[in-house]
Structure formats: C-alpha cells, structure tokens
Image (spheres, rainbow, N blue to C red):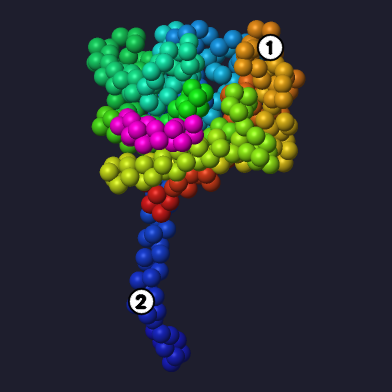
C-alpha cells in the first residue's frame, strides 16, 4: 500500500494466521462456556441429600428439623435446606421431590432417590441394628430404572400424571448428582471394624459405585456431578462413639484416623472418576471436593462467622452437645442461633453451613475440572 510514496508493509502471513486462530478460539470458548440449561436433576445419596425418602419410608424427621427455612419438618435432616436444594435452586429448578414420597410430589424436573443412612454397598444388618438404610445405592439404581421406564409409559398414556413427570429429553440432558459413601465408612467403624479393615472394603464399595454410574449412563445420562466424602472425623457422632486419644486429634479437634480414612476413600474415588472418563468419553463427569470445602469451613469457622465448629446445634450434653441415646427432636431443642453453627445434630450440617459449602463449590473452585455448576455439561475447562 502506497502512502505518499511510502509503502506500508502488510502483516506477515504468520501473524494474520495467529490472529485468526486466536479469534476462532475465543469464539469457540465463548460458545462452549455457555450455561448448560439442565432441565432436571436426578440425585442419588444418603441423608446429606435426602429430601424426604427416609421420612416417607420410616416416619417423618421430627421438629425442630426444617425450622429455619421450611418452618417445620420436610424430610430433611437439617434446620433448613441441603446442598442439593441449593443446587436445584441455582439451576432455576424446584426442590427435588423424594422418589419414595407418594404425597404432593412433582417429578417434572427430576427426582431424588437418596435416603438417610444409605450406603453404596448393601449392608448385612437391619436398620434397627445399625441405623443404616436398606435402600443402598444399587436399590436407588433399581428405583431410577423403574422411574425411567414408567415415565415413558405414563407420558404415552396421557392424563393428569403425565404433567407430573419429566419429558423424555430430561433424562439425556439432566444433571446426575451423587453424594454417598460416608455411611460405608462410618458404618464399618461403628460395627467395630478397624480403619484398615474399612480401607480393605473400599475397592469393592467403589466397584459397586462404578456399576451404578455406568448403568445410569446406559439409560442416557451424560452429565455427572460427584461429591466425595466429607471430613467424618469432625462429626460429633463419630468422635463420641469411637475411641480416640488427644494425640490423634488435629488442631481443630477432629479425629485424624477417621479423616485420613475419608481422604483415602476420596483418592480412590478420584482415580475411579478418571477411569470412568476414559471408559465413557462422551460423558462429562465433575468430581467435587466436598471434603476440602467442609474442612475449610470447620478449620476457619470464626473467619466465616461461625462458632463452636464441632458442637451440635440440636443436641444434649457433653463436649459436643451430642448424646448417642438422645437425638435431636422431642425434648431436645435447637440452639438459639443455628445460622452461626456448622453442625446441626451431631451427624448433619446446618442450612448456613450447607449454603456456605454450596457457594464455594458452585463456582468450580473445589471441582475437577474446575468448571462452575452451570457449565457441568462440558468435559473439561478448555472445552
């Protein structure tokens, strides 16, 4: 190009190509990082995500459960909402109805198969003996299979029930969440197994977990959000039930042997997730480090406005305000201000703690890949 006799050199082809490539990547990244618009959530788990399953089968969780947000019992073992409630809410979906709850349920935007006390591996004890649910993960998988099949049949038949069930595309575009495994660890310990004996059972436990994930995938599920196990050594019911010395406690007061067991389980779960990604290349699987999020909150409770991080809000007596023989409910009332407490009843978490954990996992900072919840349909952070 000539400007008054002076020629302006054209950009070198390599520079032009580089600019085009960068622009293309920027456009593709913008497109791929769009929100996933999940039409439904299907949850599998234990009491950390049970929205009414155990209550429907064995009787309602008594007051003061539910008092903070719902102003009464609604099948949750907390004073209010659970992490799964915040997940559904953030996706613009209603709170999940429990699959086992026949009254007032609406499954248009998913279903919750979790029940309190559930384990991954079926147990050889009764609920009365161990406190564990007979509705283990494989049973929840059977429930999902039945739900998936009968939804198609009922929607084809039409009628009023059609409007209470998810559309067919919800199963392929929905988010499948898993929050289970804690009871496999604590259940073994409370049955007097050593930590080494519980560790030896983990390969079989995770083998059964893998079977269920692959079964869901076979039914069309493609987007998975998998929580690992939290710091069980910080829960009053573990600290009260199981013998531990002062030397085995960390600076917060949590039991190191039990937290180390949880971390061992989590490392093996992470390995399994990596293998599942190889075996199911079209699936997007997010591994969520619930352990790190919850331990961060407990370890730095005062920094985040919480008090007495290992003390139950709803309990009775002792160092942790927890009594193995007198549970939350009836004569046992909640503390004055649950919003500053982390532990609800010695086993579960308060709504305030659940909200804090959700806020810190939803942005992807505790996840692998480090994608926000809204983008969990993407397989990696570069996609």
Q: Mark 1 points at which residue?
A: 332
Identify which residue is drawn at 60% across, 28% down: 243
Nearer-N-terminus badge (2/1): 2
Residue 21 percent across, percent down from the top left: 36, 65
Q: In this view, does 151 lie above or below 246?
A: above
Q: In the shown orientation, is residue 161 left or right of residue 59? A: left
Identify which residue is drawn at 37% across, 60% down: 24
Front residue of 309/37: it is: 309
Local crowd at mark 2 within 10 Å, few (<14), some, or many (≥20)?
few
SS majority, magenta: helix
Front residue of 84/383: it is: 84
Magenta region includes residue 197: yes
Front residue of 233/373: it is: 233
Q: Mark 2 points at which residue?
A: 14
Distance of label 2 from label 1 (alpha carbons): 74 Å
The magenta segment is 194-213
Identify which residue is drawn at 42% across, 88% down: 7
SS at mark 1? Answer: loop
Front residue of 11/274: it is: 274
Residue 179 percent across, percent down from the top left: 46, 30
Q: Residue 201: tell me if it is visible.
A: yes
């Amino acid at each position: 190009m000539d400007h008054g006799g002076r020629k302006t050199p054209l950009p070198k082809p390599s520079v032009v190509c580089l600019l085009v490539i960068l622009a293309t990547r920027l456009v593709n990244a913008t497109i791929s990082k769009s929100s996933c618009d999940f039409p439904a959530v299907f949850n599998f788990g234990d009491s950390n995500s049970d929205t009414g399953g155990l209550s429907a089968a064995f009787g309602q969780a008594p007051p003061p459960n539910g008092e903070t947000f719902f102003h009464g019992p609604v099948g949750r073992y907390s004073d209010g909402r659970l992490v799964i409630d915040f997940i559904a809410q953030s996706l613009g979906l209603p709170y999940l109805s429990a699959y086992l709850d026949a009254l007032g349920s609406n499954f248009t935007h998913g279903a919750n198969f979790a029940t309190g006390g559930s384990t991954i591996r079926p147990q050889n004890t009764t609920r009365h003996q161990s406190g564990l649910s007979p509705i283990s993960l494989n049973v929840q998988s059977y429930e999902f299979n039945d739900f998936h099949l009968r939804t198609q049949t009922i929607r084809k038949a039409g009628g009023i029930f059609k409007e209470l069930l998810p559309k067919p595309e919800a199963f392929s575009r929905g988010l499948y969440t898993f929050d289970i495994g804690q009871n496999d660890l604590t259940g073994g310990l409370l049955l007097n197994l050593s930590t080494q004996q519980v560790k030896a059972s983990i390969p079989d436990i995770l083998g059964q977990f893998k079977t269920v994930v692959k079964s869901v995938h076979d039914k069309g599920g493609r987007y998975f959000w998998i929580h690992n196990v939290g710091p069980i050594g910080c829960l009053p019911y573990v600290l009260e039930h199981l013998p531990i010395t002062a030397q085995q406690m960390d600076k917060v007061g949590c039991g190191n042997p039990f937290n180390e067991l949880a971390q061992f389980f989590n490392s093996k779960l992470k390995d399994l997730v990596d293998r599942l990604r190889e075996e199911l290349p079209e699936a997007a699987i997010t591994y969520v480090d619930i352990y790190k999020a919850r331990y961060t909150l407990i370890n730095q409770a005062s920094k985040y406005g919480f008090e007495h991080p290992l003390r139950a809000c709803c309990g009775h007596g002792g160092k942790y305000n927890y009594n193995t023989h007198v549970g939350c409910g009836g004569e046992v009332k909640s503390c004055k201000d649950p919003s500053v407490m982390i532990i609800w009843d010695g086993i579960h978490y308060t709504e305030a703690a659940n909200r804090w954990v959700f806020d810190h996992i939803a942005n992807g900072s505790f996840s692998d890949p480090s994608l926000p919840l809204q983008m969990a349909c993407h397989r990696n952070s570069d996609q």
